[in-house]
Amino acid sequence: MMGLGLALCIGDAAAALVRPARQERAPAALHQDRPQMLEGRVVAVRRLSRVITIRTPAGTTHQVAIPAGAKVQARGANGLNAVRSGGVVRLNTVAGRDGKRVARSVAVR
């Protein structure tokens, strides 16, 4: 795939929808995602679906899925039980298959 003009770094995720080789054209669709750090106050915690909603200092809200294998750093509690509404968290996230953010790690402050 020459001529895409795409720079990837360690930790990046990329996907391309490519036409068959005989058509010698650019990819029909290209998606690149770099890990994103989010920090904010927890607005809601849905424990059964493992999704939290945070509000950043800029005022934007994000819904982030917390998979069972995500690393959760907290004092005193383990896993998703450490995340409480009103608390402050720092998340290292990537885009999931459905386009929503998925946490790789969670630090509860």
Image: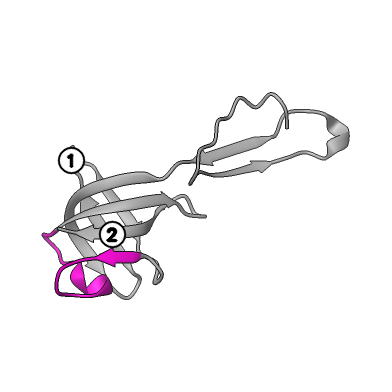
Q: CA distance from mark 1 to mark 2?
A: 20 Å
The image's mark for residue 59 is: 1
Q: Quadrant of the N terminus?
A: top right
Above or below for 15 versus 79: above
Residue 15: x, y in percent? Answer: 61, 44
Q: Residue furthest front?
A: 10
- Span of residues in magenta: 71-87
Disc 1 packing (10 Å; few <14; some 14–19; many ≥20): few
Above or below for 105 versus 8: below
**Front residue (pair 108, 18):** 108
Tally of numbered tags? 2
Q: Quadrant of the C terminus?
A: bottom left
Q: Is residue 13 magenta?
A: no
Q: Quarter of the image holding residue 84?
A: bottom left
**Front residue (pair 29, 94):** 94
Residue drawn at (19%, 66%) of the image? 74
The answer to whether 33 appears left or right of 85 in the picture is: right
* Earlier sequence position, callout 1 versus callout 2: 1
Q: Quarter of the image holding residue 2?
A: top right
Q: Amino acid at mark 1?
A: Gly
Residue drawn at (26%, 71%) of the image? 80
For mark 2, what is the residue? 106
Residue 43: x, y in percent? Answer: 17, 57
Residue drawn at (28%, 59%) of the image? 106
What kind of element bears circle 2? Answer: strand
Q: Amino acid at mark 2?
A: Val
**Front residue (pair 11, 23):** 11
